[in-house]
Image (tube, coloured by chain):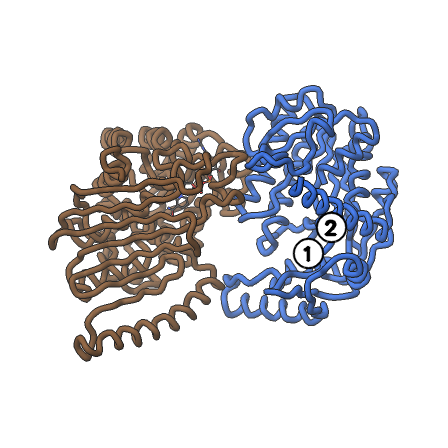
């Protein structure tokens, strides 16, 4: 996402300072992995948000921060340190450096899917999860992060929170909204639910537009929360078919949504009544997590279009084709690099 | 401001492991120290409602706060013997999140303020190791007892200085030797105490964990983990476990013959060492005892095995996947004993396989012993009895770790 945002910001003529973790722009053996660097952006700084070191200094001369960093892997405490403490440190450094404008990237994961009925519309007024104990680490930490954004906004700063749906693109075409790996197979859950997708370049444009608007004094965007999904969202089946026509996908078994939902709900009932709610099961068998990924719902990008004056530039097919092409190019350059 | 009251303790503890109710089983079995269970038997008068505070709300704080908030599934507090009154972390959001999750009224980012405003009776220090001595000293000086996560100090000189502070302030300090309190260790201890294994000859402890994994918390080069600054680097995270378990079985003896090979097989400059192979020979209550520590970063799967050899037989468990295996003379004499051992251990393996599946689903973690250690510690603090982990225990553990790191013992 960071690379796409930098590319878009530069396309629109902005000077970008990119901060990455020390090992993001080079692997330990010194090989460049293609992350943004001085050649592609205005300036770079190697920063780890979990530490205050160098953070306020890296913000000198900055008008607006686009905060994309999050830890999506590891146990709860790793994700809490990377996502929540990292955000806390960043916001405190922004205060020190006098930077007041923030585009804060949240996620669709914050919604309380158990309380949104099947077939209903998820929009910015949908409830967020107030009791996320049964959700995954990602949702739990992103919810705390959103609270920090709101506190920063309440402290008199200009904050716009963007909640992208599933961001897809190169290296993330076959993703978690389709199902999960189970052994050597991929278990798809459901076929006809609409997928809340946004192509990485479309989303990057929305983010950069938001950063331009929030940079203005007394921005209308301050205090707003905006969902970001593309137009003409596909069903699970349509999306999987289009992707599978272009790249190798794993052997798949599909379980209908009502079946999976019934199984997970029964397990939850047994857990609650017989096991005191203490048993832990894989995410697919936990309704709170299952609903967040596979429940048939509807989505809207009306607010994003209205407030950001944004319109997703790439269609689904263009996005998938561009992603496949980018993946092929990356593969070719790796092979080429190895031969030279 | 500390509130206290006395009450008469109910007779049943409601403890999941009946062996612990009888007392002393998990105590050191030789060397003369008393058992972990203090004398607070049925009917004893104990101090109610100690005020506890937690400093450092990272990963391990979840276990301490689960215990303090009465939500432990390993110990059932028959009363609110202890009340968590405040948490503290340098990160405001971490402190606030912990306070909200565990219904603790107050959260702080400054320990001195916490001590001044909350006046806790006990402080749990759960911060990175290099901060333990200064933070523990502050708490002792402020009149609080201290329960400190391991390693309490980086070396014996630091520990002596800290114990002096405790003595001067008339407060107690203890260190988490939690694995000594795991039921699986109590089971091995029992087999030595009741003579099943005969007298102790050797203790072998092996931990295998992929600590050098760049995606793990110790291998992260972006923000090196504070443990890397300790004398044994990342292995210092485990040295207290090794030493406390060995001394748990042998008693606090000295090991005149020690040799240790510290290596960094990964060659990653982030790591001081990622591998330890140590041998200790000492004189136990019943003759010579060998100790063996192995730490491995490169051989999977995750393992924490403890094997004790006695004059009659040996027994082994894995603290990550408890499954006690016992090889000893059985009915049928020397001809049939090997077969009887296979049958008995095979049946045990099936039983424990099912039990471990249940443990996984029910989220029973190897931290069970930590809850039992805290329970025993609070009981002792309340009655004024000897703590389950004493200053002598802490000294013996710390000295052994120092000894392993001495130049002259290196292989
Ligand atoms: N007994 C065991 O089996 C066991 C297991 C894990 C960790 N530990 C020990 O527990 C301790 C903490 O480990 P962890 O894994 O929870 O670490 P962690 O890094 O997850 O948490 C440490 C916390 O302490 C906070 N902190 C640091 N300095 C502070 C200060 N001066 N005042 C207030 N807060 C401060 C940090 O912000 C962080 O939140 C270590 O000593 C570790 O060795 C013991």
**In what quadrant of the picture does the N terminus of chain A appear?**
top right
Circle 2 is placed at which residue position? A166
Chain designation of label 2: A
Return the x and y of residue B51 as percentages of the image width and height.
Answer: 38, 41
Front residue of B226 and A221: B226
Chain designation of label 1: A
Residue reaching furthest top?
A61
Chain A: give its colour.
Answer: blue
Q: Is residue B5 visible?
A: no
Q: Is residue B337 visible?
A: yes
Front residue of B295 and B152: B295
**Residue at 27% of width from left, 40% of height from top?**
B411
Q: Tell me where residue A99 sits by quadrant.
A: top right
The quadrant of the picture showing ligand 1 is: top left
> Dot 1: few (<14), some (14–19), or many (≥20) neighbours within 10 Å?
few
Q: Tell me where residue B408 sits by quadrant.
A: top left
Colour brown maps to chain: B
**Residue at 63% of width from left, 41% of height from top?**
A70
- Secondary element type, mark 1: loop
**Residue at 46% of width from left, 38% of height from top?**
B268
Whether the residues at callouts 1 and 2 have beta carbons within 8 Å, the answer is: yes
**In what quadrant of the picture does the C terminus of chain A appear?**
top right
Return the x and y of residue A215 as percentages of the image width and height.
Answer: 78, 27
Q: Which mark is residue A176?
A: 1
């Amino acid at each position: 996402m960071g690379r796409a945002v930098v590319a878009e910001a530069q396309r629109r003529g902005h000077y970008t300072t990119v901060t990455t973790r020390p090992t993001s722009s080079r692997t330990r053996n010194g090989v460049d992995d293609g992350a943004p660097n001085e050649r592609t952006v205005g300036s770079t700084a190697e920063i780890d948000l979990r530490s205050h070191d160098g953070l306020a200094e890296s913000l000198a001369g900055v008008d607006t921060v686009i905060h994309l960093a999050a830890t999506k892997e590891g146990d709860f405490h790793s994700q809490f340190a990377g996502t929540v403490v990292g955000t806390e440190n960043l916001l405190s450094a922004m205060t020190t450096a006098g930077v007041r404008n923030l585009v804060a990237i949240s996620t669709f994961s914050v919604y309380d899917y158990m309380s949104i009925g099947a077939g209903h519309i998820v929009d910015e007024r949908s409830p967020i999860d107030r009791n996320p104990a049964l959700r995954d680490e990602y949702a739990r930490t992103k919810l705390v992060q959103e609270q920090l954004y709101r506190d920063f906004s309440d402290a008199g700063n200009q904050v716009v929170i963007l909640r992208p749906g599933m961001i897809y693109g190169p290296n993330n075409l076959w993703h978690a909204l389709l199902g999960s790996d189970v052994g050597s197979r991929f278990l798809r859950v459901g076929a006809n639910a609409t997928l809340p997708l946004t192509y990485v370049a479309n989303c990057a444009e929305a983010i950069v537009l938001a950063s331009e608007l929030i940079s203005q004094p007394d921005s209308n965007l301050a205090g707003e929360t905006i969902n970001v999904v593309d137009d003409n969202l596909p069903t699970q089946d349509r999306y999987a078919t289009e992707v599978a026509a272009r790249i190798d996908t794993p052997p798949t078994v599909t379980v209908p949504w009502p079946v999976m939902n019934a199984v997970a709900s029964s397990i939850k009932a047994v857990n609650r009544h017989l096991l005191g709610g203490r048993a832990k099961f894989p995410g697919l068998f936990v309704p709170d997590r299952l609903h967040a990924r596979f429940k048939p719902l509807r989505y809207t990008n009306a607010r994003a279009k209205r407030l950001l004056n944004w319109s997703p530039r790439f269609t689904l097919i263009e996005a998938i084709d561009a992603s496949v092409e980018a993946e092929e190019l990356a593969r070719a350059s790796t092979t080429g690099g190895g031969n030279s | 401001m500390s509130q206290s009251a006395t009450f008469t303790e109910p007779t049943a503890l409601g403890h999941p492991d009946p062996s612990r109710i009888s007392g002393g089983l998990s105590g050191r079995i030789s060397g003369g120290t008393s058992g972990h269970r203090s004398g607070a038997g049925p009917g004893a008068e104990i101090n109610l409602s100690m005020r506890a505070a937690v400093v450092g709300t990272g990963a391990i704080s979840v276990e301490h706060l689960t215990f303090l908030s009465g939500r432990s599934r390993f110990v059932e507090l028959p009363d609110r013997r202890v009340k968590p009154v405040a948490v503290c972390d340098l990160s405001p959001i971490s402190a606030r999140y912990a306070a909200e999750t565990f219904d603790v009224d107050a959260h702080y980012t400054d320990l001195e303020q916490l001590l001044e405003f909350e006046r806790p009776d006990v402080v749990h220090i759960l911060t990175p190791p290099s901060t333990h001595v200064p933070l523990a000293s502050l708490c002792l000086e402020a009149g609080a007892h201290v329960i400190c996560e391991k390693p309490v100090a980086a070396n014996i000189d630091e520990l002596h200085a800290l114990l002096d502070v405790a003595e001067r302030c008339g407060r107690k300090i203890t260190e988490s030797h939690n694995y000594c309190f795991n039921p699986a260790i109590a089971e091995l201890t029992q087999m030595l105490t009741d003579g099943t294994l005969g007298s102790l000859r050797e203790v072998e402890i092996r931990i295998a964990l992929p600590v050098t994994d760049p995606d793990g918390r110790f291998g992260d080069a972006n923000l090196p983990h504070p443990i890397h600054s300790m004398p044994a680097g990342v292995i210092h995270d485990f040295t207290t476990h090794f030493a406390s378990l060995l001394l748990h079985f042998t008693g606090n003896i000295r090991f005149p013959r020690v040799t240790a090979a510290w290596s960094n097989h990964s060659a990653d400059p982030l790591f001081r060492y990622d591998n330890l192979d140590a041998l200790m020979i000492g004189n136990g209550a019943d003759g010579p005892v060998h100790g063996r520590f192995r730490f491995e970063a490169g051989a999977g799967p995750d393992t924490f095995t403890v094997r004790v050899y006695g004059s009659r037989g040996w027994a082994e468990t894995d603290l990550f996947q408890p499954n006690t295996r016992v090889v000893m003379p059985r009915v049928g004499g020397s001809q049939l004993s090997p077969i009887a051992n296979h049958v008995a251990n095979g049946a045990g393996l099936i039983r424990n396989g099912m039990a471990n599946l249940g443990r996984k689903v029910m989220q029973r973690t190897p931290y069970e012993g930590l809850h039992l250690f805290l329970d025993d510690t609070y009981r002792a603090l309340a009655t004024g009895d000897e703590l389950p982990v004493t200053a002598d225990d802490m000294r013996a553990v710390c000295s052994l770790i120092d000894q392993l790191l001495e130049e002259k013992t290196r292989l």
